Image (cartoon, rainbow, N blue to C red):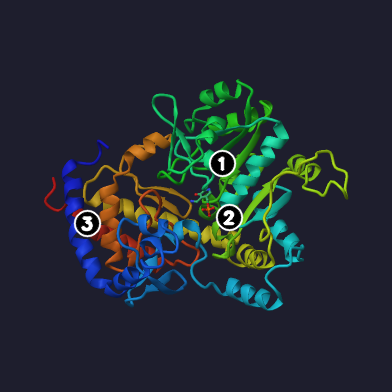
Amino acid sequence: NPHVDPALVERAREIIGRELEFFSERTPRSAEWLADAEQSMPGGVPMAWMRSLYRHAPVVAVRGRGAEFEDLDGNTYLDFNACDLAMPAGFAPEPIVRAIQNQALLGNHFLLPVPDSVEVCRLLRERFGLPQWQFTLSASGANADALRIARVATGRSTILIFDGKYHGHLDQTLWSRNEQGGMDADLSGLDPASAQGTDMIPYNDPQALRDRLARGDVAAVIMESALTNCGLVKPTPEFVEALNTEVRAAGAVFIVDETHVQFAVHGGGTSFFNIEPDILTGGKGIAGGVPIGVYGMTDRIAAVLWDHRDHDPGLEEVNDAHGLAVGGTLYGNALSLAAARAGLSEIFTPEAGQRVDELGKKLQHGLQEQVDRVGLPWKIDRLGGRIQWRLTPEEPSNGAESFASLVLAIADARKVFMINRGVWDSIATAGPSVSYAMDESGVERYIALAGEFLSELTRGVS
Ligand code: PMP
């Protein structure tokens, strides 16, 4: 990144070293707990990613309320990561706690529809426009189902993805095209054969989209309504226009993954950028941390799903010997739906979305003032309540440009500096994000602390 003086990176490394020592002094009980837990869990954590995600040791969390949580050593943190947007409602939000308590007393699951299902669909339709809905337990699960439906709808198998994307832990979406034109796995352990049914083109490139669709083998185009896992990249109007008109015209299904953007702007990126998907997927924090994934679809796609439903061939005659591979025994359970109903109707309201947008604006401007004060050429970016520390003056237009602008040492230094002073900053590729539990004083605290960090980073560096 030419907009980051190497002396700043050097300074960031010094800060990391010093702050990690301070972090160890502040978190002895967490460290001891983790060392013991290593006997029962790899890395001492119930999911290995909890250890690798932060690039400092994790703390052991004991409780949270609103926008704050507490660790085993009694340190409290104001949260701007929101569990990578799995907890945008904040911790223990009253409407969701109430809904969980009520439903737990009535039974969590019946493998039968419950009355709440229709109300959750109504709330989702009101916000995203699509008429028919299904439920899973994660956004990864929603994307897996959506891709399978697309294959059945089109009779094709190739999935087209965009650079800088993330769509969950599905083999087919965890490949990226390398500079030599082959596919590289983003992570290890993938089925190598799954690369054959995947192709990747740059985001915001209508001509590349047109050229690739013209080959006539694409079952589904799946995109994030704005790239949010490589920094922040917004779609241009020309790109949106090409997607809206050309994907369907080429006989493919257009899937938009709103998993992150739905919490940044009310109605998600589909309404913000006028994107018109056949299938819209989401999940994460809709139910306040109770596992859920959702996908909405047009009536045409819903008919494909229903016509190819799984069935007992001895009992029912439908038009295919093999039903569509969607679903799971805990999908659509009463507990997730009750929590989602409370989340959508009482927390993620249009008014709250407006408030988050205003807090986002305040955070963006406050951070920009701090960046300008220390004379750096960076431009802080924003989509609603989702802010991006952008270490370049100009907006990236695709994943490659966005990745190239990230400077891990600076993000790491900022994160550990802030944690030691009571603010849980976002992971390097994202945020900070304003949660729905945040208020103005929280935003002011982040800005002030970021200012202290920038002074420290630039001190003695011309
Ligand atoms: N889609 C997007 C855009 C995401 O950012 C993520 C998670 N970061 C997922 C899907 C998958 O979500 P989950 O891990 O909850 O399945």
According to the image, label 2 marks what residue?
A: 138
Residue drawn at (76%, 62%) of the image: 113
Q: Amino acid at mark 1?
A: Phe
Question: Which of the labelled discs sits on residue 153, or is there none?
Answer: none
Q: Is any atom of residue 129 visible in this view?
A: no
Secondary structure under the numbered disc 1 in the rendered image:
loop
Residue with the mark numbered 3: 16
Report the side of 354 relative to 164 (left or right). Answer: right
Residue 183 location, x and y as percent? 45, 31
Picture quarter containing residue 341?
bottom right
**Mark 2 against mark 1, which lies toward the viewer?**
2
Q: Evaluate whether residue 422 shows in this view.
A: yes
Establish if 461 lies above or below 73.
Answer: above
Circle 1 residue: 273
Kind of residue at badge 3: Ile
Identify residue type, mark 2: Ser
Which quadrant of the rendered structure holds the C terminus?
Answer: top left
Q: Could you say where residue 13 lies in the image, as x and y percent from the top left?
A: 19, 51
Classify mark 3: residues with Cα within 10 Å, few (<14), some (14-19) or many (20+). Answer: many
Crowd around label 1: few <14 · some 14–19 · many ≥20 (10 Å):
some
Is residue 397 shown above or below 279?
Answer: above
Asked if the residue under mark 1 is in contact with the one under mark 3, i.e. CB atoms within 8 Å, the reply is: no
Asked whether the residues under the numbered discs 3 and 2 touch, taking CB atoms below 8 Å apart as contact, a structural biologist would say no
- Across and down, in percent, residue 38 comes to 36, 66
Considering the numbered disc 3 on the image, is that residue within a helix, a strand or a loop?
Answer: helix
Give the alpha-carbon distance from disc 3 to disc 2, as whole Å: 34 Å
Q: Residue 185: x and y, percent?
A: 44, 37
Distance, label 2 to label 1, CA atoms, is: 24 Å
